């Protein structure tokens, strides 16, 4: 399938650079909380849904206290599942709080749980009328999932879910550092070549 175009700025966002494939999956380097042109932002949460560090901290900081107040009413979330809220002061309409697996060596169902996070997020976005969705690299920070393996699961599961939900026109991955971006680029290139 191959790549489309390079651009300095992706989707009106603050990406340093972004790359757009001919599929509906795009890759961006930078802060997901600064994406001002997406319908829903996915948060890499923990099962309490009560905030934390990393991308969770950045999203709650940018969204303000109403997001946490909404999360308190959700009663937590299982690993491998996701729940949706409004987006507080973010430009997006919704935040989807996905709980990825903690890496325990790879034989405790981690790939399946990670894939379910992505698939459930796309399902929720579609149910709520969203056409665009932005993901971080779920589980690859504090939860310790090796980035290369997480990237393969992430792009494959999102690609699968997009074939079911044609109403989602774009799924963006926001990668926070070049090493993570590169792993997602390799995974997406391999998927596109199949
Ligand atoms: N925009 C995009 N990606 C980011 C941002 C950002 N603003 N900040 C960090 N990343 P992590 P996890 C990247 O730890 O592994 C929290 O405390 C980061 O570099 O945020 O799923 C939660 O409350 C990494 O590549 O999420 C949970 O307790 C990726 O986002 C726990 O961490 C995910 O790193 C979840 O751990």
Image: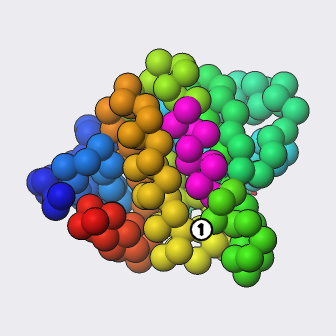
**The image quarter in which residue 98 lies:** top right
Compared with residue 127, is residue 152 higher up or lower down, i.e. above or below?
below
Compared with residue 23, is residue 40 higher up or lower down, i.e. above or below?
above
Q: Residue at coordinates 33% horizontally, 49% vertically from top-left?
A: 25
Residue 62: percent from the left, percent from the top? 57, 38
Q: Nearer the viewer, residue 132 or 119?
A: 119
Q: Quadrant of ligand 1?
A: bottom right
Mark 1 crowdedness (10 Å alpha carbons): few <14, some 14-19, many ≥20: many
Residue 107 on the magenta segment = no
According to the image, label 1 marks what residue? Answer: 140
Residue 56 appears in the picture as rendered: no
Magenta-tinted stretch:
114-123
Q: Residue at coordinates 65% horizontally, 29% vertically from top-left?
A: 84
Report whether the residue tagged 1 is closer than 8 Å to ligand 1.
yes
Compared with residue 42, is residue 64 higher up or lower down, i.e. above or below?
above
Q: Residue at coordinates 61% horizontally, 39% vertically from top-left?
A: 120
Picture quarter with the N terminus: bottom left
Q: Tell me: 53 left or right of 92.
A: right
Residue 73: percent from the left, percent from the top? 84, 25
Picture quarter with the C terminus: bottom left
């Amino acid at each position: 399938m191959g790549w489309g175009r390079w651009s300095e700025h992706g989707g009106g966002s603050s990406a340093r650079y972004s790359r757009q494939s001919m599929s509906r999956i795009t890759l961006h380097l930078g802060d997901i909380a600064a994406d001002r042109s997406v319908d829903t932002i996915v948060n890499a949460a923990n099962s309490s849904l009560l905030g934390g560090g990393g991308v969770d901290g950045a999203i709650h900081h940018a969204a303000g206290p109403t997001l946490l107040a909404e999360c308190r009413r959700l009663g937590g979330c299982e690993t491998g599942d996701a729940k949706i809220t409004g987006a507080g002061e973010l430009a997006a309409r919704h935040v989807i709080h996905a709980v990825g697996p903690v890496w325990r060596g790879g034989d405790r169902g981690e790939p399946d749980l990670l894939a379910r996070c992505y698939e459930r997020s796309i399902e929720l976005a579609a149910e709520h009328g969203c056409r665009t969705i932005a993901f971080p690299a779920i589980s690859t920070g504090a939860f310790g999932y090796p980035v290369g393996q997480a990237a393969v699961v992430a792009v494959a599961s999102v690609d699968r879910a997009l074939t079911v939900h044609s109403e989602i026109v774009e799924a963006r991955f926001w990668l926070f550092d070049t090493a993570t971006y590169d792993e997602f680029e390799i995974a997406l290139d391999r998927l596109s070549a199949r």
